[in-house]
Amino acid sequence: MRTTAWLVLTLLTFAAWCSATRAQEPPADDIGQVVKRTQRKMVKVFGATAGRVEGFGTGILVSPDGMIVTAQGVYLDGSQVRVVLADGSEHQATVLKRDRTLQLALLRIERETPDYFDLSRPPEFARGDWILAISNAFKVADHDEPLSVMLGNISLATTIDAQLSARDVAYRGELILIDAITSNPGAAGGAVIDLHGNLIGSIGKIINSSETNTRLNYAIPAPLLAKFVAGTALSAATEATTETANRPVELGIRLLTVGSRRNPAYIDQVTADGPAAKAGLQPDDLIISIGGEKIGSVNEYETAIGKLRAGEEVLLIIKRGSKVLQVPLTPIAKQ
């Protein structure tokens, strides 16, 4: 109720301002209808958790046969991914593909979805245009409750090359910076639309700068989403997933195996230029979780990596001294 009341108050206040300053924008009741139509094109995604990493996100429907674009994350690494539509119905989803560079994933449910975003017709936009950002930030919606709506505007269209050493997530490519606080748990994968309901882009994953202690609020542009769905914007990591799906993987880690294999999974060596080295793992780090699966011994580590696929990012939770760290890592195919 509080979220709904806040949304109505925001929309009415904004509409009154628009009517006095920008006559070309829709009146309040039209904006309310835009939000309702958009909610039908969106889903809540629930999956695995790992430590303090949230097990939920947001997605957008992009086809009439149940195709969903969402943000790549640990919540997709469990044995089951659950999708809830706007009507409250629940469906098991299959992860079709992921892209580490774009931090996107494509899901599918066995359900007709007549309400969806048409990615073949991206809208035009300009700096300063008003936008609405819609998502399941902080898991405010579990069933048929409406998603959260935030008002903002477009600040800048640019490109970025985020590195894991300086930020919590790697993202490289075009993005749209927005003046709306969207970098919240669960918001990634949500829709950023214009005031007519056209999809501007998808809310990106949280990017933290360790240098400035700030976060970026941004959207992945709709044309880039279209290329990802069509398979024309895949990174090398995603292509490797298709080519080596059934091959054993390598993390570039050698565990301390002196004594019983029931001992804790401490890292003994990190292979130079391997995935673990690039992710910043170090000898003596203790692995406590892989892809949401608890690791209590060397045997459990070996079982867990046997379930991984080359090219698909996975989140490791490690303990380094007194600190517990989250480390995204992309396995490679074992040669």
Image: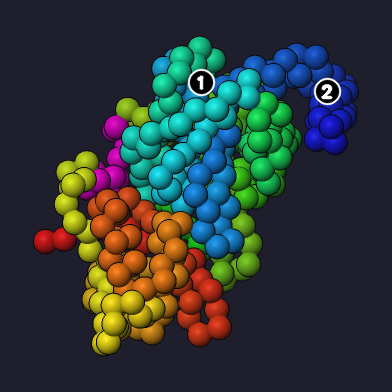
- Of badges 2 and 1, nearer the viewer stands 1
Q: Secondary structure at mark 2?
A: helix
Report the side of 49 relative to 140 (left or right): left
Taking the spot 41% from the left edge, 21% from the top edge, the residue there is: 110
Residue 57 at x, y percent in the picture = 56, 42
Q: Which residue is mark 1?
A: 117
Mark 1, Cα crowd under 10 Å, few <14 / some 14-19 / many 20+, is many
Q: Residue furthest left?
A: 335
Q: Is residue 86 above or below residue 276?
A: above
Residue 22, compared with residue 290, is above or below; it is: above
Q: Which residues are magenta?
A: 231-241
| Badge 1 element | loop
Decide: is 327 above or below 116. Answer: below
Residue ID for mark 2: 15
Q: Amino acid at mark 1?
A: Phe
Q: Quadrant of the C terminus?
A: bottom left
> Is 212 located above or below residue 162 in the figure?
below
Whether residue 110 appears in this view of the structure is yes
Quick one: label 2 or label 1, which is nearer the N terminus? Answer: 2
Percent position of residue 165, x then y = 44, 69
- From the top left corner, tell me how far across and down residue 224 is, in percent: 41, 34
Examine the image and state in which quarter residue 106 appears. Answer: top left
Screen quadrant of the N terminus: top right
